[in-house]
Image (spheres, rainbow, N blue to C red):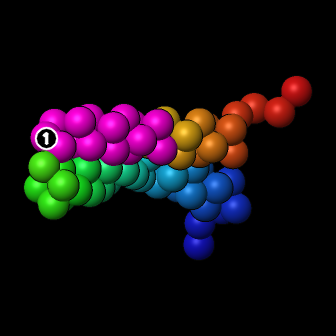
Amino acid sequence: MPKPDDRENWKAGLAVASAGIEMVVAMGVGYLVGDWLDGRMGTTPWLTAVFFGFGVAAAFLGLWRNARRYWPRD
């Protein structure tokens, strides 16, 4: 049976591993939404760049929140 410390280490490790996936998904969704809106409105490439920027910001916000959750407490 795993020790309680092992379970916490696994939990932290999986959270860190999922951060990369979360970043790719946030940026991908931002790009796809911007590209779709550009196709509908004919504003290529402006909305793609703007929504990709929003995706990058959301990705780093998620990374920051995840890092703070496992940041050592003083």
In the displayed orientation, state which residue is furthest to the right.
74
Look at the image and give the residue range highlighted in magenta.
43-58
Residue 21 appears in the figure: no
Q: Main secondary structure of the magenta part?
A: helix
For residue 46, side relative to residue 61 (left or right): left
Residue at 61%, 61% in the rendered image:
7
The amino acid type of the residue labelled 1 equals Thr
Image quarter (top left, top right, bottom left or bottom right) of the C terminus:
top right
The image quarter in which residue 33 lies: bottom left
Residue 70 located left or right of residue 11: right
**Would you identify the image quadrant in which residue 52 lies?**
top left
Q: Residue at x 13, y 49 (%)?
A: 42
Q: Which residue is mark 1?
A: 44
Q: Residue furthest top?
A: 74
How many callouts does the rendering have? 1
* Residue lying at 23% horizontally and 36% vertically, measured from the top left: 46
Which residue is at 63% across, 43% downward?
65
